[in-house]
Image (cartoon, grey):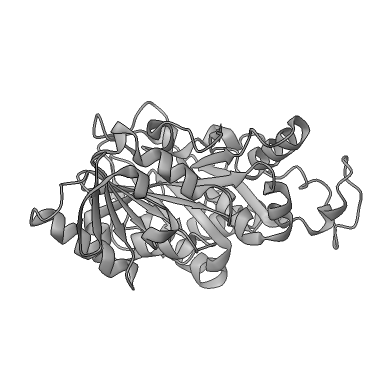
Amino acid sequence: MSEAEAPELERLPVSVITGFLGSGKTTLLKNLLQQADMADTAVVINEFGEIGLDHLLVEQAKEDTILMSSGCLCCSIRGDLIDTLRRLYKRRERGEVPRFKRLVIETTGLADPAPILQTLIGDPLLSAFYRLDGVVTTVDAVNGMDQLDHQFESVKQAAVADRLVLTKVDLADAAQRVALETRLKSLNPAAPLLPVAHGAVAAEELFNAGLYNPAEKSPDVARWLKEEAYAQGPSSPHDHDHDGDHDHDHHHDHARDVNRHDDHIRAFCLTYDRPIAWDRFVNWIEMLITMRGADLLRIKGILNVAGSDAPVAIHGIQHLFHPPAVLPGWSGEDRRSRIVFITRDLERAWLEQSMAAFLGEPAQ
């Protein structure tokens, strides 16, 4: 991590749409591309053939870019994502494509969103032009429970999401849907859960999930962190009295609970009352990355850094951290440092102890 710098608020927001195979990403994106709110949006997908754009009345095609009647700009990923995004931005600046104001990446064929998120925050040139706004994850209301049981990728997708879209709700029975919603809320307590049928959801409900309010160009710390969502303690209802092999019965009859992947996921918010020494904090983060980087699924935080009158925002995905950003000022009287962690097999108590050891002060 480098020395904190002032954020560039004009960087283009990027939203990543992910979700397990068959969970409705394509249907969702088809619906979004027909909405007026998407007119100033560029959409990057893996292959045009996988989304079926014929009915959207393509007006113009040039190389790997398609301009649609809705005003959306679609671009396919050819080779490296970094090259695709750099080339698209250059074409925007040269006036070869409309000056889009938002980028949406649909992760068709990529079960794990981490590589794309790491690309967005880890490449210095991309992070100068783009900023990660949020992750939208689709979850199949009919098959989602089974996928969460058997595929850790689907658990990870749900855990790192800023928005959870529950698809095919018209096909799921009531009990099935309630059980899945309960599980998703325990896995990711801060993400709004949006039930949809046939991909029908307003674009405004999915986007603008990031730190900055695009209308006011101001930070919205409370909405970005949502630390109050973690106030109830451990995120998983199975976090109680776990010993060794987890071979005990739960309060509901679910035979596969002994193998539930979300038993490994923890989501919590740590707060600190005193100003934090920046160099000590960096040393702590670097230690975490070295020892447990793969298990730090996502970190978001607002820090009260000693010697700084303004808060510093941090955001990391596993081994990579976005350059820290100094915000214009505190919103309200609360000056505590607040850090949201989403981890795999990494306990809150251990993080609290290790941070206290590095900073020389107790966590709250």
Tell me the residue at 87%/40% (across/down).
252
Instruction: Depth check: give the residue in front, 48 or 152.
Output: 48
Q: Is residue 109 left or right of residue 149?
A: left
Tell me the residue at 88%/52% (across/down).
255
Whole-percent x, y for residue 241 in the image: 84, 49
Tell me the residue at 66%/41% (across/down).
141
Task: Count the labels in the image.
Answer: 0
Whole-percent x, y for residue 144 in the image: 67, 48
In this orientation, does residue 345 appear?
Answer: no
Task: Indicate the quadrant containing the C terminus: top left, top right, bottom left or bottom right.
Answer: top right
Instruction: Depth check: give the residue in front, 330 or 78.
Output: 78
In this orientation, does residue 287 appear?
Answer: yes
> Which quadrant of the structure image shows residue 277?
bottom left
> Which quadrant of the structure image shows residue 21?
bottom right
Q: Is residue 352 left or right of residue 253?
A: left
Q: Is residue 297 left or right of residue 118?
A: right
Farthest left residue? Answer: 94
Task: Indicate the quadrant containing the N terminus: top left, top right, bottom left or bottom right.
Answer: bottom left
Instruction: Depth check: give the residue in front, 362 or 117.
Output: 117
Farthest top residue? Answer: 332
Tell me the residue at 82%/52% (across/down).
257
Instruction: Depth check: give the residue in front, 166 or 276.
Output: 166
Whole-percent x, y for residue 293 in the image: 52, 67
